[in-house]
Image (cartoon, rainbow, N blue to C red):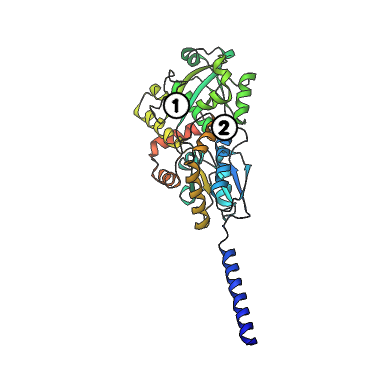
Amino acid sequence: MLRKKLLTSLLGALAGLAVTGSGYSQAPFYQGKTITIIQGREPGGTGDMRARSVFSFLRKYIPGQPTIITEFMPGGGGRKAANHIFRGAPADGTVIGNVGAGLIANAVLGQTGVQYDLAKLAYLGTPNSASHYVFLSRQEAGLTSLEKLRAATGVRIGAQTVGHDIYINGRMFAWLLGLKEPRFVTGYSGPEVDAALLRGEVDARANIADTIAHRTPEWIEKRLVNFHSIIEIPKGDKHPRFANLPEVETFAKTDRERQVVALNRAFRLGGSPFILPPGTPKEATEILREAFRKTFGDPEFRKEFKKLTGDDPTPIMPETLEKYVRDLPRDPDTIAIFKKLAGADPLPAR
């Protein structure tokens, strides 16, 4: 009888251990972990706000509710951060990259310093795809019309870094508008370009239309700047505050120039992609992709994105973004011209 009781107790204890062990094995993958989101930019700009709009929702939708922090790694129009994600970041699901549209453009163009392979990165989606870029000049420069802008020589155009999407779009405007010997001044964060413009360090800049309306509405209300042209992404999508501006493609003279504008639009539609290092475990990748899907579908996320950026989100889901990158047009002649626009050399001849 005693032996039977001991056996029963032993079996009960073993059963308890089995249940406890099973409980531990089923703990969420991210429970007790910290996810670091590395941003390829300076803090405080529109790209930072776009990234931050997802943070609280990711924590909500990732089982285990990990801690989420962000680090900034500016340089090379996002190349430094992208290279780190590809070559140096732990591929264990605890590091996510967020880089601007330069991630895709720099790789397709074969820019110097690109050490990552787009085909080997894992894509988690982007909160934004549609966008509008406006070219403007400070009021004190006296460039009050397109005619005066084109007649001026050596207009100083501010931007972040060579290869940054603001830099590339500024060059696109200067090229197609036919500016004479424009000078490109880099080394700023997004808000610092605004300050440099008002101080007279630069004369003009390209910027996202909604950023202007959200971050510097007084520029519009007090007419502190002159607006000259706009890039619509996608083509034909009119911005309510800048619908009167001529679209940059209307200044193109040839089919090749129009193809360059089309390629620029294609690059920008990639938005601000969230990426994972090659070799990230499938389990972690799928957990994160599902969290991004739920985030982008959450009505409260749309409100948060609007509050932080002044724009409505236009998300692309993970699988769609992956297909978009794979199918991006790669015409050699068009790419050769675009590469000159994205680089530091003089603008292409027309």
The residue beneath circle 1 is 231
User: Residue 121 placed where, x, y %?
Assistant: 49, 50
Task: Identify which amino acid the numbered label 2 is placed on.
Answer: Leu
Where, by quadrant of the figure, is residue 158 drawn?
top right
262 with respect to 61 (left or right): left
Where, by quadrant of the figure, is residue 20 drawn?
bottom right
Seen as rendered, the residue at the extreme left is 255
- In the picture, the quarter occupied by the C terminus is top left
Which secondary structure lies at badge 1?
strand
- For disc 1, the neighbor class at 10 Å (few under 14, some 14 to 19, many from 20) is many
4 with respect to 250 (left or right): right
Nearest the eye: 43 or 160 = 43
User: Residue 99 placed where, x, y %?
Assistant: 54, 41
Task: Identify which amino acid the numbered label 1 is placed on.
Answer: Ile
Say above or below: 134 vs 144: below
The residue beneath circle 2 is 308
Residue 282 in view of the camera: yes
User: Residue 112 placed where, x, y %?
Assistant: 53, 41
Q: CA distance from mark 1 to mark 2?
A: 22 Å
The residue at the point 46 percent across, 25 percent down is 175
Say above or below: 279 vs 52: below
- In the picture, the quarter occupied by the N terminus is bottom right
Seen as rendered, the residue at the extreme front is 1
The numbered mark at residue 201 is: none
The residue at the point 59 percent across, 45 percent down is 37
Nearest the eye: 58 or 142 = 58
Say above or below: 16 vs 142: below
The residue at the point 41 percent across, 23 percent down is 247
323 with respect to 194 (left or right): left
The residue at the point 52 percent across, 31 percent down is 306
Which secondary structure lies at badge 2?
helix
Which numbered disc flags the more N-terminal residue, 1 or 2?
1
